[in-house]
Image (cartoon, rainbow, N blue to C red):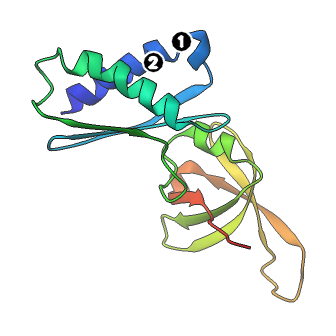
């Protein structure tokens, strides 16, 4: 199935070179049994109409290829707020937002994403001294991160 995932990635790379799609990017392709899930995003989010266009684009190729199981179920969507970050561009897109982070050590933390670069990111986290109101900047490397995702807040 990895062959199919790589093929889908290459099809989308080709599509995303077109001017209309330049700001879009692939987050992840997940294939389980007959289900193919494609998670996309862009700098300004992704619409249902864009997901439909990408779905039709991919179906054109998937229906003709022998590597794809018959009667597959294709889902094209945004990753949603509840899915962990998979790629660098997701971090870039979410600068200024609150994140929930789980470190590889198991420690959980939350804070505002301040900046990102190729090796890691910086977050503003609550001061270790709970009596102090200000936050402190914490640098983190990607290899320290088990999971990071946008903190969902209803306030």
Q: Toward the viewer: 13 or 132? A: 13
Q: Helix or strand or loop: what does disc 1 sit on?
A: loop
On residue 65, the disc is none
Q: What residue appears at the point 11 percent right and 31 percent down from the top-left corner? A: 69
Whether residue 10 can be seen here = no
* Coordinates of residue 97 in the picture (x, y in percent): 73, 56
Q: Toward the viewer: 61 or 113? A: 61
The residue labelled by disc 1 is 17
The residue labelled by disc 2 is 13
Q: Is residue 57 above or below residue 85?
A: above
Q: Helix or strand or loop: what does disc 2 sit on?
A: helix
Q: What residue appears at the point 81 percent right and 87 percent down from the top-left corner? A: 130
Q: Residues within 10 Å of mark 2 (few under 14, many from 20)?
A: some
Hey, which residue is sitting farthest front in the picture? 49
Q: What residue appears at the point 65 percent right and 61 percent down from the top-left corner? A: 99
Could you tell me if the residues under marks 2 and 1 are in contact, i.e. CB atoms within 8 Å? yes
Q: Toward the viewer: 109 or 64? A: 64
> Is residue 142 shown left or right of residue 122?
left
Hey, which residue is sitting farthest bottom in the picture? 131
Q: What residue appears at the point 51 percent right and 18 percent down from the top-left corner? A: 16
Quarter of the view holding residue 44: top right
Give the Cα separation between the discs numbered 2 and 1: 6 Å
Q: Is residue 98 above or below residue 126?
A: above
* Coordinates of residue 116 in the picture (x, y in percent): 70, 43
> Is residue 107 shown left or right of residue 137?
left
């Amino acid at each position: 199935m990895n062959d199919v995932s790589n093929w889908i990635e290459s099809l989308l790379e080709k599509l995303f070179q077109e001017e209309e799609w330049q700001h879009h990017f692939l987050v992840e392709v997940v294939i389980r049994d007959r289900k193919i899930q494609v998670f996309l995003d862009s700098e300004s989010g992704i619409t249902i109409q864009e997901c439909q266009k990408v779905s039709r684009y991919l179906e054109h190729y998937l229906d003709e290829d022998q590597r794809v199981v018959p009667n597959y179920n294709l889902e094209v969507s945004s990753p949603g707020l509840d899915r962990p970050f998979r790629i660098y561009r997701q971090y870039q897109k979410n600068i200024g937002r609150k994140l929930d982070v789980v470190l590889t050590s198991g420690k959980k933390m939350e804070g505002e994403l301040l900046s990102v670069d190729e090796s890691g990111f910086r977050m503003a986290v609550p001061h270790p001294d709970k009596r102090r109101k200000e936050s402190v900047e914490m640098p983190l490397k990607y290899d320290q991160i088990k999971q990071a995702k946008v903190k969902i807040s209803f306030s």
